Amino acid sequence: MFEWEKNLEEQMIGMISKVKWEVRGQDRLVWVGEDLQEYTVKSGYSILNCEDLMQTSDTFQTLWSLKVAPSAIVCAWR
């Protein structure tokens, strides 16, 4: 790891450590693009065409502005 990457690693770990995990109940997949929490092609298309979605999230702005390898960003984004 390069010296300049250590600061970025600490930032990323800090962001991840702030995530609050709930351990109640069983895991399940939920689509937040619709009120019914079920994926539809229409809701997926709507999300893909919504430019404001990425711009309103500080997390996404921080993530995409990091000066790291693109593959690392995509891995963190997923």
Image (cartoon, rainbow, N blue to C red):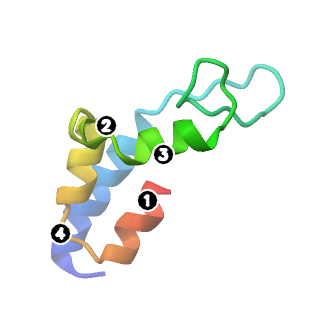
Q: In the drawing, what numbered circle is on residue 31? A: none
Circle 2 packing at 10 Å, graded few (<14), some (14-19), many (20+), is few
Q: Residues within 10 Å of mark 4 (few under 14, many from 20)?
A: few
Residue at 32%, 40% (x, y): give it: 50
Q: Which mark is in front, 3 or 1?
A: 3
What residue is shown at x 31% (from left), y 75% (from top)? 70
Q: Which mark is residue 53?
A: 2
> Residue 67, labelled with which disc?
4
The reply to whether the C-beta atoms of the residues labelled 1 and 2 are less than 8 Å apart is no
| Residue occupying the point 26% across, 43% down | 51
Query: How far, Cα to Cα, is label 4 from label 1?
Result: 13 Å
Q: CA distance from mark 3 to mark 2?
A: 13 Å
Q: Amino acid at mark 4?
A: Lys
Tell which residue pokes out farthest to the right in this image. Answer: 26
- Residue 43: where, in percent of width, then height? 54, 36
Residue where numbered disc 3 is placed: 45
15 or 39: which is nearer to us? 39
Q: Residue beneath label 1, please?
A: 76
Tell me the distance, in whole angstroms, between the alpha carbons under discs 3 and 1.
Answer: 23 Å
- Mark 3 vs mark 2: in front: 3
In three-dimensional space, the C-alpha distance between marks 4 and 3, rounded to whole angstroms, equals: 29 Å
| Amino acid at dot 1 | Ala
Task: Give the residue displayed 69% in from the left and 31% down from the top.
Answer: 38
Depth check: 2 or 77 in front? 77
Mark 4 and mark 2: Cα distance apart in space: 22 Å
Towards the viewer: 35 or 13:
35
Q: Position of residue 35 (x, y in %)?
A: 59, 18
| Towards the viewer: 66 or 2 | 66
Judge whether 1 appears above or below 65 on screen. Answer: below
Q: Is residue 72 left or right of residue 56?
A: right
Amino acid type of disc 2?
A: Leu
